[in-house]
């Protein structure tokens, strides 16, 4: 066995940015798609008639559908039910400030 002395490289070694970026994107994409497929396979929610028929062999009598609640309507209710400040000098049901 022969041992040789180390030599100085002719070009400096640097990370290959393009290769590392491409590998990072591909690995991240593969992990994301894999995770989405696992979540889809483990999902047990019944979202429609086809899911219901696949989950049970009994006949489907009726499907009840309700539209999603609009955001603007729920925000309107939240602001209507929020307590408001009384203007100074206003009379309330239990007290009245008079000066």
Image (spheres, rainbow, N blue to C red):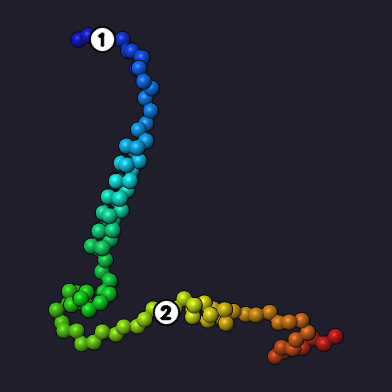
The residue that disc 1 covers is: 3
Residue drawn at x 29%, y 46% as measured from the top left? 26
Q: Is residue 68 left or right of 85 when viewed as pictured?
A: left
Q: Which of marks 1 and 2 is in front?
A: 2
Which secondary structure, mark 1? loop
Outermost residue on the bottom side: it is 93
Residue drawn at x 37%, y 35% as measured from the top left? 17
Query: How many marks on residues?
Result: 2
The answer for how far apart the CA atoms under marks 1 and 2 are is 77 Å
Disc 1 or 2, which lies upstream in sequence? Answer: 1
Q: Nearer the viewer, residue 23 or 45?
A: 23
Label ID, residue 58: none
Residue drawn at x 31%, y 83% as measured from the top left? 65
Rendered location of residue 66, percent (x, y): 35, 83
The residue that disc 2 covers is: 69
Q: Is residue 63 left or right of 16 when viewed as pictured?
A: left
Q: In which quarter of the image is residue 90?
A: bottom right
Rendered location of residue 32, percent (x, y): 30, 53
- Crowd band around label 2 with a 10 angstrom C-alpha radius: few (<14), some (14–19), many (20+): few
Rendered location of residue 46, percent (x, y): 26, 74
Outermost residue on the right side: it is 99
């Amino acid at each position: 066995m022969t041992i040789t002395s180390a030599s100085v490289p002719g070009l400096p070694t640097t990370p290959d940015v393009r290769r590392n970026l491409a590998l990072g994107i591909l690995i991240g994409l593969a992990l994301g798609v894999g995770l989405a497929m696992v979540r889809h396979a483990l999902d047990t929610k019944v979202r429609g008639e086809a899911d219901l028929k696949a989950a049970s062999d009994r006949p489907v009598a009726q499907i009840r559908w309700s539209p999603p609640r609009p955001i603007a309507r729920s925000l309107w209710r939240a602001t209507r039910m929020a307590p408001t400040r009384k203007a100074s000098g206003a009379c309330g049901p239990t007290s009245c400030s008079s000066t």
